[in-house]
Amino acid sequence: MSKHWYFEDFYPGQEIDLGKRTVAEEEIIAFAREFDPQPFHIDREAAAHSIYGGVIASGWHTCSMMMRMVVDGLMCSASSMGSPGLDGVRWLQPVRAGDTLAVRYLTVKVKPSNSRPDRGVVWSKWVATNQRGEEVCIIEGMGMFGRRPA
């Protein structure tokens, strides 16, 4: 049985491995057609003549894949109460078809709520690397988690 995560289970310096995902060109193009139809995301010929030399994933697609990995690897078995938002997103390297992304959840800071004793806030950094170990995306933000029942 997998662990259920409560606010008390998070601590600064913690690293949680959320697994890997290989990206297919078909999903890159499908996502981009729907949400970010720039030529270097949806058109092989135009992408080949772009500064990227080929089709790359939308940064928003990369963030969405990371979100899915965070949900599947952590949030679905946590007392997550959602998030008040993100502090930053950085796209550091293009994500290409065939890349395998590995995502780590790094706990930066934790603070019990002063006004609501049933929860606390966890500041985190999500880091995605490709199969060469290059960081491709970093997301920084915060999430609210329920406290462990008495």
Image: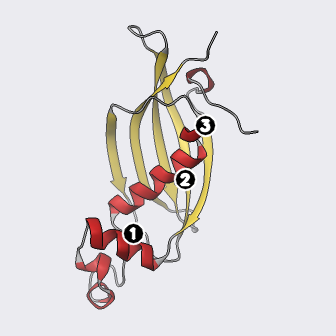
Dot 1 or dot 2: first in sequence order is 1
Crowd around label 2: few <14 · some 14–19 · many ≥20 (10 Å): many
- Checking the image for residue 103, the label placed there is 2
The picture places residue 8, in percent across and down from the top left corner, at 60, 20
The picture places residue 140, in percent across and down from the top left corner, at 39, 41
Q: Which residue type does callout 1 highlight? A: Pro
Asked whether the residues under the numbered discs 1 and 2 touch, taking CB atoms below 8 Å apart as contact, a structural biologist would say no
Q: Which residue type does callout 2 highlight? A: Val
Dot 3 or dot 2: first in sequence order is 3
**Which circle, 3 or 2, is nearer the viewer?**
3
**Front position in the image: 10 or 5:** 5
- Checking the image for residue 77, the label placed there is 3
For marks 1 and 2, give the CA distance.
Answer: 15 Å
Q: Residue at x 34, y 84 (%)?
A: 53
Q: Which residue type does callout 3 highlight? A: Ser
- Checking the image for residue 94, the label placed there is 1
